[in-house]
Amino acid sequence: MRARFERYSEKASALQHDPTYDQRGRSKLHEARQGLGTLRRANEGERKPLLKILLMAYGRTGKRRHELMLPLMPKGDSPAGKTILNTSSRSLTEAMKYGSQEQTATPVSSGRGPGAAQVNQGAWSAYVPDFTPQMRALLESTIQSPPPHLTRPVLRRLQPRIEEHNAWHRPMPLVRVKTQTKAWYAGVLERTHPPLPRTEWKRLFDLATGRKREAFIPRRTPAGLARQSALEMAVMYGKTSPRLAFGNREAHRLIPRYMRHLWSQVFAQCPVMEWDCKILGWKVGWGEQALLDNASLGGKQFPSTPDVTVSNRNA
């Protein structure tokens, strides 16, 4: 949060004469206060803010998710790839539409793109980049073993389903076919859970199963006077704050059992990928399956380094 404000302050001198400068500054300040409030409630042990922070930290949402997605994308260092992923989840579809205008995986030599029937049969790479072997293996594994849909919708298929005829029973115009193909591609990316690095995945597994414990820094007791009552706050400030007057009723002690439950929720959505030299393919493993295997074995015989055994696909 501090780094974001420092980067924004560098542009302040150039934007001072912009008519929307003050409004944007107030918007950013409000956004920062909301983020600070989320961090404060997470430190108090409130479940939803704490889970939100953990999901962002392990790349299930937010900027880090896009960073983990970049190695899976075709030509991730291209302007199109950066445009697709360097954005918020809410604007991912719009970024995908813009990025695909700059680069496509398979240019159409005849000058006329495939129709809806051809796209449904697999010729969609004329409009959007094709999936890399890593991405295809991850998506197929997601369909076979769908993780808990805590942060994003379930991926059900890899092929687009575009209507072949419009309302007048005529062949669907190619412009609409192209637009719908890009929307389908953006939806697939939106439903993708990027894999964690192997070492980070193992550490999260140990935290979720209680083999390791996170060392938390004790919270500092705020200095000052005793907590004011609701009546005193109303007399002094003209209004009262239920949270300050009565405390945070959603707060929870960060005991190991409470944290293991949160770690498990995050870990269940985290895949890991490895290249298998024997089968010459990618192997994908999911945290949810690792937790089930660990529970079935009583948490004792399961190895500290779980094997990745969910699926494999050739590159």
Image (cartoon, grey):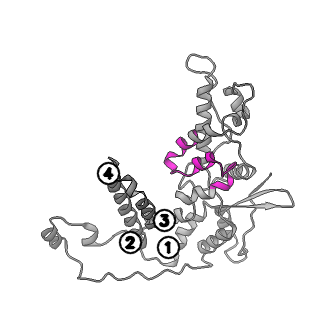
CA distance separating discs 3 and 4: 28 Å
Q: Earlier in the sequence, mark 4 or mark 1?
A: 4
Q: Which residues are magenta?
A: 69-97
CA distance separating discs 4 and 1: 41 Å
CA distance separating discs 2 and 4: 34 Å
Name the residue that disc number 1 marks. 258
Taking depth in this image into account, of 15 and 44 the one nearest to the observer is: 15
Name the residue that disc number 2 marks. 251
Instruction: Please state which of the two labelled residues, at mark 4 or mark 1, is closer to the viewer.
Output: 4
Instruction: Please state which of the two labelled residues, at mark 3 or mark 1, is closer to the viewer.
Output: 3
Q: Is residue 143 left or right of residue 61?
A: right
The amino acid at mark 3 is Ile
The amino acid at mark 2 is Ala
Identify the residue shown where x is 24% and y is 72%.
245
Location of residue 264 in the rendering, given as x and y in whole percent from the top left corner: 57, 67
Q: Are marks 3 and 1 in contact (CB under 8 Å)?
A: no
Location of residue 209 in the rendering, given as x and y in whole percent from the top left corner: 61, 73
Location of residue 89 in the rendering, given as x and y in whole percent from the top left corner: 52, 50
Residue 19 sits above or below residue 111 on the image: below
Q: Are marks 4 and 1 in contact (CB under 8 Å)?
A: no
Where residue 53 is drawn, which disc sits there? 3
Q: Is residue 281 left or right of residue 141?
A: right
Location of residue 14 in the rendering, given as x and y in whole percent from the top left corner: 40, 54
Q: Earlier in the sequence, mark 2 or mark 3?
A: 3
